[in-house]
Image (cartoon, rainbow, N blue to C red):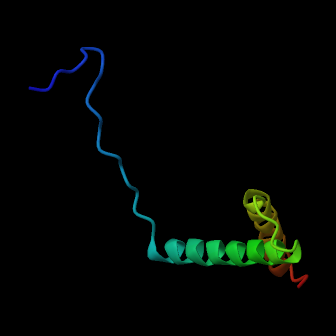
Amino acid sequence: MNARSPNVSPMKEPVLLHEPESMQKYSDEMREQIANKAYELYEKRGREAERDVEDWLQAEKLVRQEMIGEEVGLT
């Protein structure tokens, strides 16, 4: 027998939204670009540990800047 608190409602199944395949591909490509850039930053710092989040955030910023530059024809 399952005893349940009277104030706790049963968990609902999560609703997963289906992304179009083109968006999934774009997201994967974007993640790969960011990961590659973050690794470049890690390498440039001499593989200094425990700064992965900082590298990732900086990589996101750099990849976005590169994308914006491409959109306006700067690169």
42 and 47: which is toward the camera: 47
Residue 54: quarter of image: bottom right
Q: Position of residue 18 (x, y in %)?
A: 40, 63
Farthest residue toward the left? 1
**52 sits to left or right of 65:** left
Residue 3: quarter of image: top left
12 and 53: which is toward the camera: 53
At a point 21% along the width and 21% down the height, the residue shown is: 4
At a point 64% along the width and 77% down the height, the residue shown is: 32
Where 44 sits versus 2, above or below?
A: below
65 and 55: which is toward the camera: 55
Q: Position of residue 70 (x, y in %)?
A: 82, 81
Q: Quick one: quadrant of the N terminus?
A: top left
Q: Quick one: quadrant of the C terminus?
A: bottom right
At a point 83% along the width and 73% down the height, the residue shown is: 41
Farthest residue toward the right? 74
**2 sits to left or right of 19:** left
Count of residue discs: 0
Q: Position of residue 29 (x, y in %)?
A: 61, 78
Residue 42: quarter of image: bottom right
**18 sits to left or right of 38:** left
6 and 63: which is toward the camera: 6
At a point 78% along the width and 59% down the height, the residue shown is: 51
